[in-house]
Amino acid sequence: RTMPLSRHTGQIPESTWTLGFREMTEPWKGAVGCLGVAVFFAMTIGIISWQALEQSPEEWVLRGRDAGMLWERGRGALLLRALPAGRPVLAIAVGSVPATEPPPPRDRCWHDGGQFCYSWEEDAELRLSLEPPAAPGTECYGVRWTPLRPDVTLKDCFSMANVSWYGGPSIRAQRWPLNGAESPAQPLVSGDLSTNPDGFGPVLERYFLGSTGVTVTVAPDVSLLLSLESHRQFCLETPAGRAEPLHYQLCVTRCPKHLTRHFPPCRSPIWRYHGPEGSAAKIKRGLRALARRLRRHRLQEGVVALGERGTAVLAAVDLVPSGLRKRQVPALVEPLELSITLSPYASVTSPLFLRSLLGGEAAGYWLSRQPRPGGSSIPLLTTWKGQLCARLNVTSEAALHWYLARARRLRQALGATYVAFEGVEGNSFLEQDVPAPPELEGDGYTEVLAATLATLGNGTIISAGARSSHLPLFVQMSPLRSDWSQAGLKGLIPSVLHYSLLGYNFFIPDAVGGSVAGATQGDTELFVRWLQIVTFLPVMAFGTPPWLCCDTWVLNLTRQCIQRHRDFVVPLLLKYSEEWQNLGYPIFRPAWWLSPTDPVAFTIEDEFLIGDEVLVAPITEKGQTWRDIYLPGEGHLWLDTNTARVFDGGTTLRNYSASLAEVPVFVK
């Protein structure tokens, strides 16, 4: 047995080490020095390696019950992950602070477990907070950036990698999802696509829904620019040089936002009048002639819509207290009903505007530039349909009262059932780079005017919507090109899904065949395929009557589609409008509504559901009589209304045949 050697436990005498070192030769001294340096580097590398292994590139900064926020080091990004498994929900690239300076855990509000704060001392401050849920079953986080210098532009970009995005603005060539859209940074404000095709359209909300179950909602008081980078990301940013905060809310949820609204009744179809408008007499003769032709072709249902110019011509004659005229005018289009069109613009040559220049109460009827100290207000002039115009001042109670009273008198004098209002969209101050009153920042004008017009009753149609989906109004969709492109027929279904998701379920689509000149005007096939889609929408609208554009069989098909809309579609809309009021679900739903975990369903933009029970899958390709159809909802069964065959949900029908006279429709 070997015994252990005894060791001296005291300190090693320093003299021994000193003497021994002194007695070493120079080569040995060098070797010992190199060894010391090597040990030092080895220890340093070991510490760095240990830190790299121990410190994750992602660090939790705020946790809730169902999800949590992390900071990703290196690229500077906020991540939202669902708990408990940590499933990725959202990645936000932060563009307002240097990514090389990652936060935490230097938390400025550590005493509050529901918040996380961090400050990049020369750039911006970030505050994350758990917030009350927007709806049951959701968990929400507030994100607030505050600039610390006037020249800091706050910008957060939301990744499209593995996430399909929906909502936001309407655009000229609407896409579903939004991932395929492209747009430079511009104010997120409603606009007129006919005058600015590269801008945003008349219906938009500061609300985005991701396929991972996340919603992004931006506060209405935030001055906001939006950019869309196709298949990469979309970015929210504040205007440069204004030192304004960027504030939005993230919610982890499976359902779209909750909205309620009443179903405004509207007769269908709508027949747009395009006859002579040179005088009131010519317009009246043209309206009577159109009504006679509709009766002759057994299309005596619906509404005849008169445009703004024709309405103005009749108003100049008929806006006179005359009981005789009030009794005669409805006979213009009997048994159909009449719709007239107004706008909040007045030409600078109009009698009313000229009178307002003389002062008095009418002087405040129009939007004005903010006067200089001691100066008088100057009307903010803009262009509307090629004319220099003033625009109604919606901040003036007197102006709104006058405008509503005029609309009511005109509706009564002309015997109209419906009044359509064009030009509701847009921010006149922003367009001219003029400071706006606080209440008219962003889409304040559209919001205030829509709320005012809703008091006219259910027979009101407006051209734009922003934070007004709860109002009992019909919204007129933007005009589409008369062709097969994404700005034409192919953009119709994406627009339907976009409007409905944002809460605007009761819209009037563009006229069958499109109303903006395209490459294929007078195309019978285009007219028929368009007709087959609008049959299943809230209202059918026609610009060109079928007897003028097409053969007799198309006229017969139009009658059949109108009857199908009345007997089959309208009852469905009434049924699902109740569900919308109670649960907030859109009436027109994408395929992923029934297949929320199937990535195939996220990018389907040529099919739509009415509620959960009817699937419409029309053909939108020129010359095609077949298509692939995705049937959503694994475990569901779908009845083909054309063949009476039954198919399983969660499957794709390949090369489904549909002649020009057929539209594929399936009932669950």
Image (cartoon, rainbow, N blue to C red):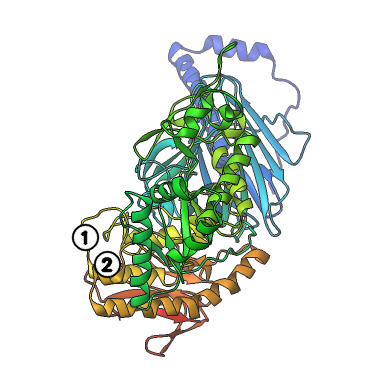
**Residue tagged 1:** 520
Q: Is residue 105 above or below residue 609?
A: above
Asked if residue 149 can be seen in this view, the reply is: yes
Judging depth in this view, the residue of 33 and 593 nearest the camera is 593
Query: Image check: 572 left or right of 655?
Result: right
Q: Is residue 238 above or below residue 452?
A: above
Q: Residue at x 69, y 15 (%)?
A: 13
- Contact between labelled residues 2 and 1, with CB atoms less than 8 Å apart: yes
The amino acid type of the residue labelled 2 equals: Leu
**Residue tagged 2:** 526
Spatial separation of the CA atoms under disc 1 and disc 2 = 8 Å
Disc 1 is placed on an element classified as loop
Query: Image check: 183 left or right of 140?
Result: left
| Location of residue 182 in the rendering, given as x and y in whole percent from the top left corner | 36, 45
The amino acid type of the residue labelled 1 equals: Thr
| Location of residue 174 in the rendering, given as x and y in whole percent from the top left corner | 39, 53
Judging depth in this view, the residue of 454 and 134 nearest the camera is 454
Q: Residue furthest right?
A: 111
